[in-house]
Amino acid sequence: MDIEAQKRAAGEAAIEFVDDKMIVGVGTGSTVKYFIDALAKIKQRIDGAVSSSEQSSKLLREHGIPVLDPNSVGEIPLYVDGADECDPHRCLIKGGGAALTREKILVAVAKKFVCIVDVHKCVEVLGKFPLPIEVIPMARSHVAREIVKRGGQPVWRQGCVTDNGNWILDVHGLQITDPVKLESEWNQIVGVVTVGVFAQRSADVVLVGDGRRFGRG
Ligand code: 5RP
């Protein structure tokens, strides 16, 4: 199965987690796009969506799916999103699409987080994919220096402005053997908005495009 077919398979498989009258949390990226296409086919069954990016909100609206403000919906039953890397404990690197902060907010308010990936995203240890970090623009150099002290090689993703008006550093050269620790410690660096490690709250279920699935539920 080629990668595109795997992305589609994973995106379509996530539909089984959608119940009637749900407000569905929707992530960002090329895999999620297939989930949105599949969601559109059952849109009359759901009450609407909350979205992790302007890009996904636009797609949802084009399909006639109402996009709601997360502040007005409270806890959501389900959040579906892709990842850049996924380890055997369902810890993730996310943020390749620069939507990591809104993604982490939706993960935090979701009862169940279903992650959809193709087989190439599955790794033993996180870090080969450069770790995205969203930073306040005026803190870019400070955060970069702090990351170098911690053994990373930060590269400024030039030209990229997040939906929140911030910038992204992509950190190369990492082997993240303790993702919970790294997430917690690096989030404390002044000027960091969000570290793209999702480990303190990992995925509940991972659906791989080759048909494998792991996790709870
Ligand atoms: C966006 C993300 C995406 O989920 C991640 O980049 C995977 O994207 P794709 O499905 O296009 O490979 O974290 O910020």
Image (cartoon, rainbow, N blue to C red):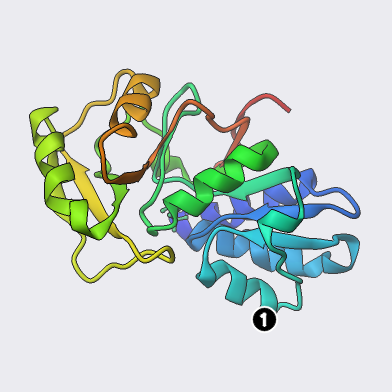
Position of 49 with respect to 90 (left or right) is right
Instruction: Please name whichever residue, 203 or 121, is drawn nearer the observer in this view of the structure.
Output: 203
Locate residue 34, reporting x and y percent. 61, 62
Instruction: Name the secondary structure under disc 1.
Output: helix
- Residue that numbered label 1 is attached to: 62
Residue at position x 75%, y 69% in the image: 40
Q: Is residue 74 above or below residue 108?
A: below
For ligand 1, the image quadrant comes to bottom left
Nearer to the camera, 34 or 112: 112
Who's the residue at 76% across and 78% down the image? 64
Q: Residue 132 location in percent, x, y?
A: 30, 47
Q: Is residue 37 left or right of residue 138?
A: right
Sort mark 1 into few (<14), some (14-19) or many (20+) by Cα contacts within 10 Å: few
Quadrant occupied by the C terminus: top right
Residue 117 appearing in the image: no
Against 75, is 186 above or below? above
- Residue 173 drawn above or below residue 158: above
Amino acid type, residue under disc 1 in the picture: Glu
Relative to the observer, which residue lies in front, 195 or 29? 195
Is residue 113 in view from this perspective?
yes
Q: Residue at x 42, y 28 (%)?
A: 87
The quarter of the picture where residue 198 lies is top left
